[in-house]
Image (spheres, rainbow, N blue to C red):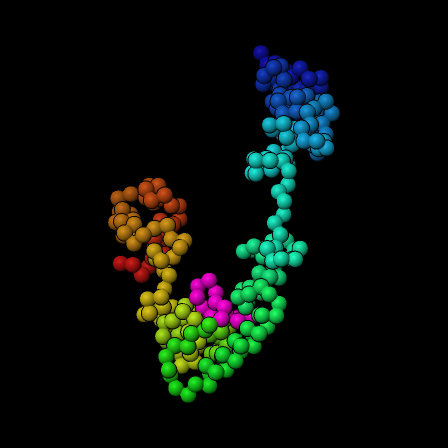
Amino acid sequence: MTTICSVEGCTQTVKTRSWCKKHYSRWLRYGAIDVVNKPGPSPGGRVCDVEGCDNRHDARGFCNKHYLRWKKSGGVDLPAKKGCSVAGCPKPHEALGLCTMHYKRFTETGAVGGAAPLIDRVSARAFIDKAIAVSSDEGCVTWPFSRTNTGYAVLSGKLVARIVCRRVHGHPPTKNHEAAHSCGNGDKACISPYHLRWATPKENNADKLAHDTHNRGERNSAAKLSEADVRKIRKLQHSHSQTAIAKIFCVSRSAIWSVVARRTWSWLD
């Protein structure tokens, strides 16, 4: 015999405690069966324990907002906003302890002050002029100013190699062309005009392989597999499913497929 929910007007069958699934879930969450599921305090139901918060209870005495905050940080109060580390700057933190303005200035000039970067910028342009004026190849010309995190010379957010290459060889043939180094010392901040030329990405990558300055394979910081792993995966493909191989190496099945199909690690025999 089918038992009907005891709530007046409800025609659903009983799940437990003489209520249907809907009313039982409502009672379980809010402590009452006549609560309407909408934002704001719940009539007859429990509210958040945080002082001044009238949102309905969700878990551990908190509403959903305060519960998620407690779960993430261990407290319900908003963490204090970190400010810029430069003395006297009231702006909020962006990166490396600096606000957006000082961080941009630091990446462009290597300093966060006001007057010093201007002097450095003048000196930097004079250094470029002097490097271009050299009449013969005297070896690598190392940039003494700011660099990218990979070691390339930079000025005002632009790669110095491109600035020099444009002045010596004109504008690049296409927007995809790169300033390639014949010396292989681009990551050591070389800007010698005799070592620079416009090259396609494919040609530039070929240079990196020739100079052994590439970051493919195990050199890539994001790589989860080694060369030995890849060779083993390609042997296992004949006896194991890709799903099984993925579990062995703790990577996704799509990563295994890419290795087997040579979408990745295609250069490795």
Drawn side of residue 28 relative to residue 179, left or right: right
**Secondary structure that dominates the magenta span:** loop
Specify the farthest residue to the front.
Answer: 87
Asked if residue 88 is positioned above or below residue 233 in the image, the reply reads below
Badge count: 0
Asked if residue 116 is positioned above or below residue 27 in the image, the reply reads below
Quadrant in which the C terminus is drawn: bottom left
Drawn side of residue 190 relative to residue 99, left or right: left
Quadrant in which the N terminus is drawn: top right
Which span is picked out in magenta? 145-158
Residue displayed at 62% across by 62% down:
101
Q: Nearer the viewer, residue 203 or 123?
A: 123
Residue displayed at 38% across by 53% down:
223
Residue 180 visible (yes or no): no
Residue displayed at 36% across by 68% down:
208
In the rendered image, residue 33, in percent from the top left (x then y), is placed at: 68, 21
In the rendered image, residue 77, in percent from the top left (x then y), is placed at: 64, 38
In the rendered image, residue 31, in percent from the top left (x then y), is placed at: 66, 21
Q: Nearer the viewer, residue 134 or 237?
A: 134
